[in-house]
Amino acid sequence: MSLTLPDIERIASLARLELPMAHRERLLGQINGFFDIVEQMRAVDTSGIEPLAHPVAAIQEVALRLREDQVSEPDQREANQRSAPAVERGLFLVPKVIE
């Protein structure tokens, strides 16, 4: 996958960014370089390799320090939503922002 200059311009527009042409061209090269690295990584055969739980696990034994999943605070949903402009069935209502 690679992007074109119009793709960069569209992404900048969606992000409400004004990018000078030099920045657009440099960004295009950087993003396409990133996609090249991703494609190289996809080309590696990883069948039969078990995923690591931690990046250092390949080098040394890592003991994960996980805490128990317990409720530690009382339910304060109603108090937290009191100042919200609009709430429905326990959910915050927000204006639509996607065009």
Image: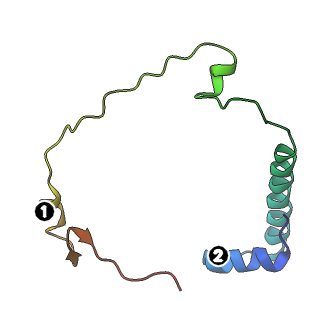
Q: Secondary structure at mark 2?
A: loop
**Vertical comparison of 45 with 63: above or below:** below
Horizontal and vertical percent position of residue 17: 64, 75
**Vertical comparison of 27 with 67: above or below:** below
**Residue occupying image coordinates x 69% and y 20%:** 58
Q: Whole-Å distance between the Cαs marked 2 and 1?
A: 38 Å
What residue would you read off at disc 2?
Answer: 17
Q: Earlier in the sequence, mark 2 or mark 1?
A: 2
Horizontal and vertical percent position of residue 11: 69, 75
Name the kind of residue labelled 1 in the image.
Glu
Which residue lies most toward the front here? 48
Q: Callout 1: few (<14), some (14-19), or many (20+) C-alpha neighbours within 10 Å? A: few
Q: Nearer the viewer, residue 51 or 57?
A: 51
What residue would you read off at disc 1?
Answer: 78
Residue 18 visible in the snapshot: no
Relative to residue 60, is residue 19 drawn left or right? right
Residue 31 visible in the snapshot: yes
**Residue occupying image coordinates x 85% and y 65%:** 2
Name the kind of residue labelled 2 in the image.
Leu
Where is residue 9, by image quadrant?
Answer: bottom right
Relative to residue 67, is residue 31 drawn left or right? right
Horizontal and vertical percent position of residue 53: 58, 29
Q: Callout 2: few (<14), some (14-19), or many (20+) C-alpha neighbours within 10 Å? A: few
